[in-house]
Image: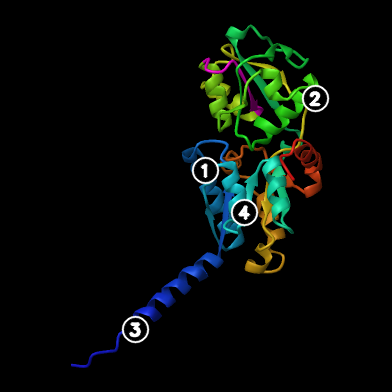
Amino acid sequence: MLVRPSIPFVLLFGLLACGRQDESVSTLYFSAIPDQDETRLREKFEPVARYLSQALDVNVEYVHASEYKDAIDLFKNGDVQLAWFGGLSGVQARAQVPGARAIAQGEEDPNYYSYFIAHRDTGLLPADEFPMGLRGRRFTFGSSGSTSGRLMPEHFIRMHTGQSPEEFFGAENHYSGSHDQTVELVEAGQFEAGAVNYMTYDRRVAEGQTDPEVCRVIWRSPRYPDYNFTAHPDLDRRFGEGFTDRLAQALIDMTDEDLLSAFPRKSLIRAEDDDFKDIEAIARQLEFLR
């Protein structure tokens, strides 16, 4: 009987490794800041990955990041080449990856804002003026890396009170970890007040998850730019000249309401780094960016 020579193990391992490497190079990986829980994020972004794969004729996979910093590190290390960042995390990521650029944002993102919310037992009511009645209250931010749940609320606190959050509230800052958690903690009375992005709060009220009579909006912040898609400079090298522009156009051409609800946005529009220059300036002033 003729026995065929077997492939040496080292060669076989090398071929398999090469196959995995080729697959990795031909796949566009994207991530997003974890402003909601993992299950909800996967349900939202995996269909977006399938849409982009069809539109661009490349394999696209969503990669979950467990923390805001993880999303930035994945992008910095080249493990993902596209990320849905907040205003602050986008500025931080682009500062660490020369050549990275913002390519798309939601129609609503140039005019984003935060809510300051309070439990009804505080007696605080909605007002146009910054709520000085928050002084000394138990207050929670969202994630420490959030634009709408930390950076901009801190900026407005300092601007209106002349004090840091620690000085104004009389305690070390607390971070809930996400916008949903902030609303839940305030509604449960574990914290008297907090800062949250308006979209999360409005969605929860619309879905019946939050009682606006118990967890009240007491102040709406001025507007500022926020979320954006940022592209890694490695994209054109991996997928060909002009690929980043094709990717930007595919995002802008995404009109399916179910896909847009992942963000959630009415539509996506062009974005440029200069759109976030005010966020960058505030981040440097508050030492979120060095």
**Dot 4 or dot 2, earlier in sequence:** 4
Q: Do the residues labelled 1 and 4 touch (CB within 8 Å)?
A: no
**Dot 3 or dot 1, earlier in sequence:** 3
Amino acid at dot 1: Ser
Amino acid at dot 3: Ile
Return the residue at label 4.
75
Amino acid at dot 4: Phe
- What is the crowding at mark 2: few (fewer than 14 residues within 10 Å), some, or many (at least 20)? few
| Measured Cα–Cα span from mark 3 to mark 4 | 38 Å
Magenta segment: 189-198
Return the residue at label 3.
7
Return the residue at label 2.
159
Which of the two residues, 253 or 132, is positioned nearer the viewer here? 132
Q: Does the magenta stretch include residue 193?
A: yes
The correct choice, above or below, for 1 with respect to 232 in the image is below
**Dot 1 or dot 4, earlier in sequence:** 1
| Measured Cα–Cα span from mark 4 to mark 2 | 32 Å
Q: Are marks 2 and 3 in contact (CB under 8 Å)?
A: no
The x and y percentages for residue 87 are: 71, 41
The correct choice, above or below, for 198 with respect to 76 in the image is above
Element carrying mark 4: helix
User: Furthest residue to the bottom?
Assistant: 2
Q: Nearer the viewer, mark 4 or mark 2?
A: 2
Which quadrant would the C terminus be assigned to in this image? top right
Q: Which mark is residue 66?
A: 1
Q: Which of marks 2 and 3 is in front?
A: 2
Element carrying mark 3: loop
The x and y percentages for residue 20 are: 46, 68
